[in-house]
Image (cartoon, rainbow, N blue to C red):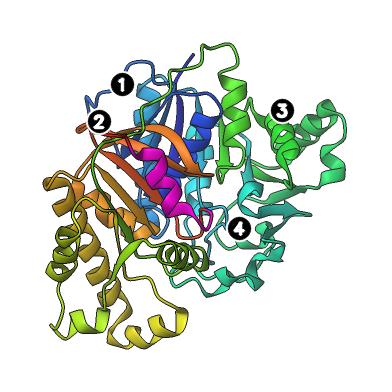
Amino acid sequence: MPIFGCVADDFTGASDAASFLVKGGMSVQLFNGIPEKGSRIAEGVQAIVIALKSRTQNTREAVADTMESLEWLKEQGAEKFYLKYCSTFDSTPQGNIGPVADAAMEFLGTPYTVLCPALPVNGRAVRNGKLYVGGVPLHESPMKNHPLTPMWDCRIANLMEPQSKYPCVELWKEQMDGPADEIRAMCMGQSGAQAHFYVIPDYQDMADGERIVELFGDLPLLTGGSGILEPLAKRLSKHQEMPPELDIQAEGPAILLAGSCSKATLGQIGYYQAHGGLSYKMDPIAMLEGRETPEDAWRFVRENWGTPVLVYSSDTAQNVKDVQRYGQEHVARMLEQAAAELAERAVAHGIRRVVVAGGETSGAVTKRLGFSSYRIGASVAPGVPVMVPMENREIRLVLKSGNFGQEEFFEKVLEMTRREEG
C-alpha cells in the first residue's frame, strides 16, 4: 500500500490527525516540521503526518512549506494526500486555509476537493454548509473571541470567499443521500465550468463521515479536520494486516504542563485539584516583576519527586485580560518558554511522561525537546494520542489542544501511561 500523506497546520492538529489514522487501523509516523532529506521512516509505517506552523504563519511561507511537504511526501511514494486544519476552521479573511488548499489542488492536478472541518465526536458538525460547535453556530461560540483567529461567520463558503480563488459548492444531507453516481456526475459537471472548486458536505454523525469517504475517498487530495480520517484510514487499510499496538506505558514520575485558558482545560485543572492532584500555578505578573521564575516551579516538582505534578498558567478570561496589559505576545511567549524549560529539565532528570495542554504551549515544548519524529499510540481522548519520540523511545509525550479531552483527562492519561515498576 502506498504511504498516505497528511500535512497539518500545527503540532497538536497533527497529533490529532495521527490519532484518528491509528484508530482507523494505520501505522503512523509524525514529523515535527518538514522532514530533512534522508529522514528515516520507521518499518511498517503506512501514513506520515507532517506538522507545520501554517495556521498562523505568513501566508506565503505557509504555502511554500506546504508545497515542500507535499513534494517530500510524493518522493516517499505517497499517492493520496490530506490537508489537516482545525475543526473550528480557525479562519479570518486573511486566513491560510484557502491559499494553501488552492495551491495543493493546483500542485496535485485535481479539479476539486472537499472542505470538511467537522469532528462530531468533539461537538463540531456541519449542517446546511454551516459549522456548529456544541450545537452553537461557530461565530456565536467561544471561538468568536479566539486571540489569534477570531471567528466571524459560520457558513464555510463565506469564510473561504475572501481567501480562495475558487468557488464552493455545498452538499446538504438530503443531497448526500442521493445515488453516488449522480453526486459524482454533478461534481464532474461543475469541474467543466470551473478550473477548481470545493465541495462542502454536511457531516453531523459518523455515518455522514463514512458517506463522505465513500463519495470522495478516491480523490488524490482531501482537506478537513480529523473527522473523516478514521473512516478514510479504514478504507485505505482494509486489505492490510492490523499493525501491532504501540507500547504507551513508561516507568517513573510524570509532569503535567497546562497553558491553555479554554473552558475544557480549566475544568480539567479543577477536577485534578479537587481529586487530590498536586499543582503549582505560575503567576505571570510575579514573573514579569521578577518575583518568580521557572526555578520556583521546578523546585516544587523536585520537592514532590515521584508524585505527578501539574504546573499551569491557565486562567480565566478576565484574569488573562488583566495580565495582557503587559503585552499579549510578550506574556504568552514568557509562559510558553517557562513550560518548555520545565519540560526540558524534567526529561533531563529522568521524567519519562510529559503531558501538555494547549496548542501554543505544546509547540514550545516540542521545539525545546528537539525531537523530530514520533510513532503514534493509542488515544487518551479523541484526537489526543500518546506519542513515542523516535530519538528517545523511553519517553511518552501527550499533547492536547485546549478544548479537547474529558474532565478527568489528567487522571486518565496518568493511568494509561503508568507502568508499574518491578
Contact, mark 1 vs mark 4 (Cβ under 8 Å): no
Tell me what residue is drawn at x 75 percent, y 36 percent.
207
Who comes first in sequence, dot 1 or dot 3? Answer: 1
Residue drawn at x 12%, y 48% is 349
The first of marks 4 and 3 along the sequence is: 4
Circle 4 residue: 160
Give amino acid for label 3: Glu
> From this viewpoint, is residue 192 visible?
no
Q: Which residue is mark 2?
A: 390
Query: Which residue is painted at 72% across and 62% down in the image?
Result: 135
Kind of element beneath mark 1: loop
Tell me which label, 2 or 3, sits earlier in the chain: 3
Report crowding for label 3: few under 14, some 14 to 19, many 20 or more residues within 10 A (C-alpha). some
Marking on residue 214? 3
- Quickly name the residue at label 1: 42
The CA span between labels 1 and 4 is 37 Å
Q: Overall secondary structure of the magenta stretch?
A: helix
Q: Element at badge 3?
A: helix
Q: Is residue 146 above or below residue 55?
A: below
Read off the magenta span: 406-418
Q: Tags 1 and 2 in contact by the CB under 8 Å rule?
A: yes
- Find residue 63 and report its horizontal and vertical position in percent: 40, 48
